[in-house]
Structures are given as C-alpha cells and as structure tokens.
Amino acid sequence: MSLALDLALCALILGAALATVAGGAVFRAVIFFITYGLFLAIGWARLGAFDVALAEAAIGAGLTGVLLLAAHGRLRRMQAGDAPPPAGLNLPAALAGAGMALALGWAWFALPVPATPDIAQALPRSGVGNPVTAVLLNFRAWDTLLESIVLLAALLGVWMLARNDDWNAPLGPRYHALSGGVLVNFGRFLPPIGLCFGVYLVWAGADYIGGAFQGGTVLAAVGLVALMANVVRPPRVSYALLRVAVVVGPAVFLLAGLLAAGFGGAFLTLPPALAKPVILVIEAALTISIAVTLALLVIGPPDDAGRSS
Amino acid sequence: MMADVATYVLTALGLVFFVAGTVGLLRFPDTFSRLHALTKADNLGLGFIALGVAFQADTWAQLAMLALIWALALLAAGTVAQLVARAALAQVQEGE
Amino acid sequence: MTVWLHIVALGLLASLGGALWRVWCGPSQADRMMAAQLVGTGGVGVLIVLAALQDWGLLVVALALALLAALAAVGFIKAQTPDGAGDPEETAPPAGWQNRHATGQADKRA
C-alpha cells in the first residue's frame, strides 16, 4: 500500500516535470513548475526530510512561483510572451539537460558512498537537538556562511539592473491596490499570522522542525504579500535600516566565527558549552537577512517606469 | 473504536468532496463555473479530512494546528477565488 | 487504519492528477492558475493524512503550505493587470457581465 502511494507520487512528480519542459507555452510551463514544487514538497515529506519539505513548500511553490509569474507578465507586456523560442535552440538545450541528468544518475551509482560520521553521536556536542540545524550551523557552518553571502551577492546583482535615474526610488514596481478591497484585507490579515509562524519556526528549529532558512522564507513570503497588497511600502536602497537588515546575518555569523578563533579555537568552531546561545543569536540574525533578501530579490530593482510614463 | 469509525466516515466524505471538485474542474463548461466548483468542494473536502484526522490526534496542540490549517486554507481560497475571477473577467473584456 | 489512510492519500493524489490535466488543457490562464490552487489545497490534505501516518511534525509543513497557498495566485493576479502592479478589483467589471457567463443565475433573477 505504501509502495503504491510512493509510486503515485513519483508519477505525479515526473509528470509535472515533463509537462514543464514539454511544449512551448510559457505560462503553462510556469504553472506546471509551481505544481512540481508542491509535489516535490510532498515527496520530501514522504522521505522524512521535513526541513527540506518546508523549504521546498515555501520556495518552490511560493516565492519562485511569484517570481516566474511576474517575469511572464513582464514578457507579455513587452509583446514577447508566448513567442516560441527560435527553432534549433530546443534540441541542444534538451541534449544538455538530458546529459546532465545522465551524468548525475551515473555519479549516484558509480561514486562510493562516503563514510558519514554518526550525527546522533555528535549531536549532544552541537548544542541543538535538530540534526539538520546542527549540521547547518555547527558542523558545516562554513557552507552556510558562504551561502548567506551568496544570497547577498545575488541581491546586489539584481540591484545593479536598476536604471541610473531610478536608483534611489523605492524598490520594486509601484504596487497599488483598491483600498478596502479583498487583496488589501488579505495583505493585512495574513502577515501577522505568518510573522508568528516564521518566528516559531526559527525558535523551534533548534530542536524540532524549522530553522533560520525555513523561518526566513516564510517571513519573506508574507512580507511579499504585504508589499503586493500595498499595505507595506517598499524601502529605498539608501535606507540605513534596510542595509543593516541585509548584512546583519552574514556579519554576525562571521563575527561569531572570528571570536571562536580568537578564543583559542579554530574559525567557526563553537565551544560546546556556548553552542546553543551562539547558534540562536546567529539564527536570529540570519533569519532577518534571509527574509529581507529573499523578499527584495523577488520584487526586483527599483522600477519607476510605471510612474514616469 | 468510535474515534476510528469517525475517521473512516469523515475522511471518506472529504475524499468524495475532493474528487467532486476535480470532476467539476474537468467537466464544467466555462472558467467561472469551474472556479466556483473548485473552491467550494475543495475546502469542504479539506475540512472533512482535517476533522477525520483530528480523531487520531494525540494532543490538543495537534488539534489546534489542524484547525489553523483549515482556517488558513479557507482564507486563501476565498481570497484567491475572488481575485482570480476578477482577473479572468478583465481578460474576457479585453478579448472582445 | 493505516491501510485506509493510505487509500485516502492515494485518492487525493489521483484527484490532483486530474487537476494536472486541467493545467495542461487550460484554456484560459485563470483555469490553469485555479488548477494549481487545487493542487495546493490537495497537497495540504495529503500532508495532513501523511502526518497521521508518519509523524505529526508534518503538520508544520502542512501549515506552511496552507499559509503560502495564496502567494502564487496573488503574484498571478498582479501580473495580469495592465502595469503588472495593480489589483483586478480596481477596474469595474464590464457591463452585462452578470448574464454573460452565468445564464442560470440571470434566469433566477428575472
């Protein structure tokens, strides 16, 4: 019975993935990609990877969907929406994609299984009870630190796309909505719930499902709803608090690592006695940065085109 | 024992509503009737499934979570149905 | 009970497969978006059932999915407006919209 469930889930994931790349209709592909993210989240849940399922639900089905739909809307306004890609481009792309899939499949079977250290044994020394959080913020903190910096770099890259005249305009397009309408009320009602849930995820992430990344993504998503409903105005790039929010995560993380090195350990090695409070501080700072960065990545650079025309 | 029976009955009902929603989505003639079939049947289905599963829950926290999940799904569905219908209406206008 | 919950989850997945068919066929973009919405609601249902089957912690994932269920659709209706940043409720519905698509409703009122 449980095998039938897994097979059905596999069929849906593969079906949604195939439907995404098949055919030339852009909008259809975007919607299939959103459903693909939803099925993938269920798949991760089925595999017992709850933290990954949480991140996939928030990013794959939520944020990426908004990003792609906005991109499709922009293409349509530029009269480039559903124009089929130039002939001859599809085949090389398909071959490259299939080649990559084959190479990954080969690597999965051919490479030896690495001898993984027993996490359960090391867990008490990490300061937290959730093995995923222990790996992300203690055992492999280096990776997480670099990832948070990559996110920051991506945001700077997006901001560079702004036109010179728009640079100090509020970020993103000029959202507007009918005051008192359904969208505005939704934008007022949902964010407080999301705020509580996001903070809960960060707090519970130390010992249970959740963590800075999952909590930050939920916060980014509800923040995005508030922005799109025009309940909250997007800030300007020059706004000092915004700049602090974007760098506080990586900065606190780096500082903690350097302090650990200064007090006799190596870079980013947390002493077991202090691990829990330090991890909570890092997670809180990271959450702020991740939430703000992800939301701003989705709304994009300042775009004043709507107002000036 | 009674709890198990309640779970069987309620989740079966929920499943029926979900299937009805999908059949409506596939069979109804135009966009607006499809919208209408979908949001109602779906959320009733989710409510019954949540209620059925609630009979298997161990703690009050789980019951509260189930209730919150359903409430949020209702809120989202109501908002989305209204907004997507308005967007579709604008498109109909554009097309003529 | 375990077998039954598996059957319910399977039934939900099957009905989501039906929704995928509507995503493929369309014809309008609103149809496709609403079918994705059905997949979202159904996904919450599947996760609730899996929570009873596997681990109650999955309710947290279901809650996240329910909380963000409307996000993609809000992005969709934003992108549908003329400047990509508006609200479909800002423009008045076209004249005669009430009986254009819901003839049954119009008859009742007459």
Image: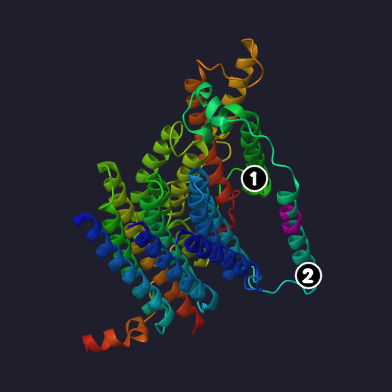
Q: Position of residue B37 (x, y in %)?
A: 34, 75
Three-letter amino acid code of the residue under disc 1:
Trp
Q: Which of A222 and A50 is in front in this view?
A: A50
Q: Does the magenta stretch include residue C13?
A: no
Side of A150 where A193 appears, left or right: left
Three-letter amino acid code of the residue under disc 2:
Leu
Which segment is the magenta one?
A101-105
- The image quadrant where one finds the N terminus of chain C is bottom left
State whether residue A237 appears in this view: yes
- From the image, tell me which residue sits under label 2: A91
- Which quadrant of the figure has residue B27? bottom left
Disc nearer the start of the sequence (1/2):
2
Q: Mark 1 lies on which chain?
A: A
Q: Position of residue B55 (x, y in %)?
A: 25, 53
Q: Mark 2 lies on which chain?
A: A
* Residue at the extreme top: A264
Q: Position of residue A15 (x, y in %)?
A: 58, 68
Q: Which of A134 and A189 is in front in this view?
A: A134
At x 76%, y 54%, the residue is A103
